[in-house]
Amino acid sequence: MTGDLAVKPTARLLRAAGVLLSCFTALLGLLYFILAGALLGAFLLWPRTRGRAYALLAAGARRLAALERSRRSVFFHDRFPEHHASDQQVLRYLAARTYTGLLCGVVVGLLVFGVVLAGLLAAGVARSTMTWQELLPQVVLGGVLLFLDVQGLHSLAALDARLARECFGPSERELLERRIDELAASRAAVVHAVDTERRRVERDLHDGVQQRLVALAMLLGRARRSKTPEQADALLEQAHKESREVLTELREVAWRVYPSALDNLGLQEAIGGVSERCSIPIRMEYDVPEPLAPSLETAAYFVVSEAVTNAAKHSSAEDIFVSVKAYDTFLAILVRDSGVGGADPAGSGLTGLHSRVAALDGSLNVHSPVGGPTTITAELPCA
């Protein structure tokens, strides 16, 4: 706590020094525009030399803009990432910076003038040459002018920061704050997606597997109470068929929770399992030369699985194309069906995929015009 209190006055002094320095750098900008206008004005008007003259003007402006960038870094601790602004952006920034800096110099001059007048007023009070009736209006007027000066300096400092941000890009602090907001939103979305997935698994178990197990128990009970061997055999055969269907449905639910083939056989075989269980023919391209991280394989599998499941249920497609390819820095996934289209990106299934992909800093896009086809693309960073 003591260290923070000690640092804050230093930071304020640095910022004040940066504001004062901006007045002098604005004078440099004004002198530059006057000299450059005098030397290059005629060449800027002549079409044949305009390009070269404009390039020279922008080159000098870039040097002054670099000086302003260094001022922001030293006195305001702004750390801007590498950003290549156009010549027009640099010239616009330098012109606006020159104007605001000169205006800031005027405000600082008025503030200094007010301080001098306040000193003279205090000296007059000390010598008892002024009455309270003469002093009070001047104190009120001086306080109002001081407030306006301080507010003007604060507004000009904020404008200076905004101009630098527009020219040099967001600072590292702003990028970090933006990243924190994205991670917070991503974490909330992942928690929501996990809860949604749990509810879906519970619904599948309750409405599917549990009902089949109840039917199986009833068949076995009827077989035990049957009066003839033929009736018992028929009921047992029906119960055996029901048990196989229960096992199949349990296997489907288990694959939707987490496919064991990912750990045992890898992503390609796990996606192949999706193709085998789908009622629609699937054509697949797989080009991933190296094993992927487990989290990346899991996300890629669920993107393909959910997209194929949605297509099989809702698209009325005749075939589905799946492509999984690895590039230098990302894994690209594409699922396209020949169905009727009209998929809702805000639906529960696709929203869950958005959350799962966003948790890995990836992107997911859904293009599904009415009439089809529906194309789902995802890019997952490998690094």
Image (cartoon, rainbow, N blue to C red):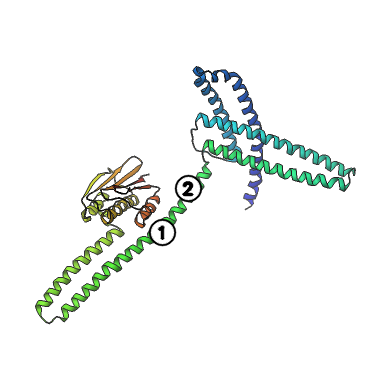
The amino acid on which the numbered mark 2 sits, given as a three-letter code, is Arg
Q: Is residue 43 left or right of residue 362?
A: right
Q: Mark 2 falls on what kind of element?
A: helix
Quadrant of the drawing holding the C terminus: top left
The residue that appears at 66% across and 33% down in the rendered structure is 102
Q: Mark 1 falls on what kind of element?
A: helix
Q: Residues within 10 Å of mark 1 (few under 14, many from 20)?
A: some
x and y, in percent, of residue 236 in the image = 14, 73
x and y, in percent, of residue 68 in the image = 58, 33
Contact check, label 1 and label 2, Cβ < 8 Å: no
The amino acid on which the numbered mark 1 sits, given as a three-letter code, is His
The residue that appears at 49% across and 21% down in the rendered structure is 51
Q: Nearer the viewer, residue 83 or 238?
A: 238
Q: Which mark is residue 192?
A: 1
Q: Residue furthest front?
A: 371
Q: Is residue 262 visible?
A: no
Pointer 2: what residue? 179
Single out the mark in the foreground, 1 or 2: 1
Between the residue at mark 1 and the residue at mark 2, the CA separation in whole angstroms equals 20 Å
